[in-house]
Image: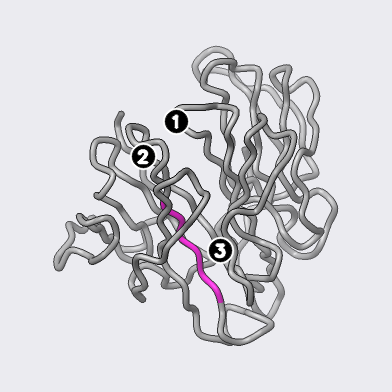
Amino acid sequence: GTGSDGIRSNVITGRGVYKSTNAGKAWSFIGLRAVGQIGAVEIHPEDPDIVFVAAMGHAFGPGPDRGVYRTLDGGGSWDKVLFVSETCGAVDLEFAPDDPQTIYACMWRAERKPWTIISGGREGGVFRSRDGGDTWENVLFLNDSTGAVDLALNPRNPRVLYAGMWRAERKPWTMISGARVGGIYRSDDGGDSWRLVLTDHSINERAPYYTRIAVDPDNKERIYFVNVRFNMSLDGGKTLVDDPPQGGGDTHDMWIDP
């Protein structure tokens, strides 16, 4: 999936989805050229022809192409299965580790203007589908203004979810007006209920540009926060470690060897 989902003053514009069938030696274009920035691509764990794409949309204005797309034939055709509005796009997707019919999508209002970044609105949050993407419900949102969102799941404890979600005290929310509040929310029942477990400035600096979290596959209480600086918690988000290991600043993503 092409394009940069961490929109800032410079934006790498998306040009659709590409597919390789020979371990990355060659790639072919398979569609969605008009969907703008792509936040995530998730392949069904049992059927590689079923793929979901999170489309943020074009960064500089509203548009009908924002949302979650699904293909059932390896990219031969695509259907938009979740659409919230022309200003609210999809930035993250996750399959439930124990049930690929259950899918989570993070929706976020984000626009890049010449003078600011608009981040947040009343329509975003964490959405859940229990029927393979046919229907969706919003299971986590902030009533006043839901900002950037990211989701992390623990594969050995599939009902434990962590969501990084930010909001604003002033509206309309922009990167240069309004204080960011919010934090890490945790669910122990697959998204039916949530509680706020951590709020700390070091994990939500420049929320529209970072907002990445990950959870240890062997330990559901060990969480990593990727941001201006790297941070982690060893107690399920209640506290941050005092002196986390550092590999330099400006950290944007991480992958854990399964």
Residues at discs 2 and 1 in contact (Cβ within 8 Å): yes
Tell me if mark 3 has few (under 14), some (14-19) or many (20+) residues whose alpha carbon lies within 10 angstroms of its own. many
Q: Amino acid under label 3?
A: Ala
Q: Where is residue 169 in the image (x, y as percent from the top left)?
A: 56, 85
Q: Which of marks 2 and 1 is nearer the N terminus?
A: 1
| Residue that mark 3 sits on | 148
Task: Name the quarter where the N terminus is drawn.
Answer: top right
| Span colored in magenta | 162-167
| Residue that mark 2 sits on | 154
Residues at discs 3 and 1 in contact (Cβ within 8 Å): no
| Residue that mark 1 sits on | 97
Q: Which of 139 and 109 is in front in this view?
A: 139
Q: Earlier in the sequence, mark 3 or mark 1?
A: 1
Q: Which marked residue is nearer to the observer: mark 3 or mark 2? A: 2
Q: Amino acid under label 2?
A: Asn
Q: Which residue is drawn at 40% across and 36% down?
A: 158
